[in-house]
Amino acid sequence: MANFFEDNDDLRWYVDHGVDWDPVVRTTEWDFRAQDAPASTADAVETYRDFLTMIGEFVADEIAPHWEELDRQHAKLVDGEVVFGERMQTIFDRIKELDLHWLTLPREFGGMNSPILTYFMSAELMARGDQSVMTHHGFHGGMAMAMLIFSVREGTTKFDPAQGRIAETRFADWMAEIGSGEAWAAMDITEPDAGSDMAALRTVGEQDEDGNWFVSGQKIFITSGHAKYHFVIARTEKASSSDDPMAGLAGMSMFLVPTYRDNEDGTRAWISTLDRVEEKLGHHGSVTAAMSFDRTPAHLIGERGEGFKHMLTLMNGARLSVGFETIGLCEAAYRLAAAYAAERPSMGKTIDRHELIADYLEEMRTDIQGLRAIAVFGAWHEEQAQKQDMLLRLDPPEDELARKKLARAQRRHKAVSRRVTPLLKYLGAEKAVEMARRCLQIHGGNGYMTEYGAEKLLRDALVMPIYEGTSQIQA
């Protein structure tokens, strides 16, 4: 039986040897204080390995073989509701059965309490199977964890240090809804006249005399934009002039916006407008949507004016996720090219034995290993930065020197992650296009035909240097 984790020696090496798991596990498990915590770091890592083995088998058997259906069956907008293709829906029904949306959520909310790094590794496996599946899956558990992180930052999460568990948090019900697969969340930044230039955003957040918040405006190119919950960045502060700092990023705030209510009869009552679902060059199984808000009730995250700071948290995680996504696509392109080259005869031998093609394949394999090294390094530091920040806020050391030492370590991890993430996003995206293009070239004329899958990889790769921050903005 095929398994995309077991057949990947390099990825398995990181799980078994290359990752320093102990600090990750200790912060994730609050030093093993909870009764249901693993007995040791070794026990925890064995569980993570089991998760990845299960996901690797699932992707190899139930996602990758159906790439043609996923590409052919586009998501569509029908009577105001998004309808997935039949195969995409079948896969997500199965993901729900396997509880994969719970992977990183704390056990006290029904989750598996795995590190974010484990999710990123699973994202590579899913992306190797199909880009659309990985993309939509990423807007479940990752967004629920963002809800927890933001609640911790704003002081609306309570922690029980004796039990090593979160006692309550602001968005607990919504997190559980996402973990169960009944809902997901989206990240709304781009507007018709504002992409990389965030200062040009026009969506506004307004507060009434009773303190209630509402957002108005239009967001476009929203991945999984038919979500129930949307993180929306909007302008809340009025500027006296174009030179006023409030006219720029300082005037932005972050909101969490439910876009519909569930009726008792199973239908939805939309409180925002799903304008359209885009027809795309690739990623046909996933949804990219436009959404309009007209005084839609919203929940302010943190304080006014903190929108850009919170957006960076979302964006850094998204760019790391895209980095692992590019590795999955590169892995698929390399293996497809290598398999074809091993069977295609030319001039008395298969083309993988011709020096030029052999060099191409070896270069692809080496680049993938290099990208994975950068990705794991960056994700490890991002995990430590996020988990140590939670520790400082919820359960800080009693000793002042220990607190200062932990705070310095947290800032160091954050700085490393902020340096590595744009490098990974840029290099991974550009290499994904390059390797998909090379895969097609190795296939020759067959690569230009739809039945081999090489051209699909290229179509799926072409958005990588564009979404979650263009290659040009990563500098």
Image (tube, rainbow, N blue to C red):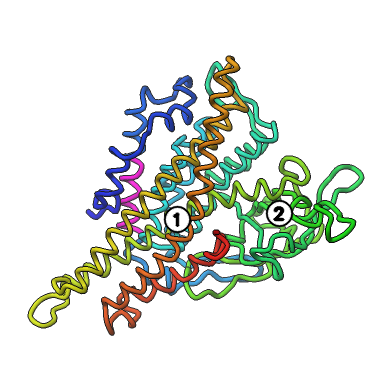
Quadrant placement of the C terminus? bottom right
Q: CA distance from mark 2 to mark 1?
A: 23 Å
Whether residue 137 is in magenta: the answer is no
- Foreground mark, 2 or 1? 1
Task: Name the residue tied to disc 2.
Answer: 233
Task: Name the residue tied to disc 1.
Answer: 323
Q: Label 2's element? A: strand
**Quarter assignment of residue 331:** bottom left
Q: Which residues are magenta?
A: 50-63
Q: Is the residue 306 above or below the residue 472 in the image? A: above
- Mark 1 Cα-neighbour bin, 10 Å: few <14, some 14–19, many ≥20: many
**Quarter assignment of residue 443:** bottom left
Give the residue type that dot 1 points to.
Gly
The residue at 35%/35% (across/down) is 47
Residue 284 is at least partly visible in this image:
no
Whether residue 55 is in magenta: the answer is yes
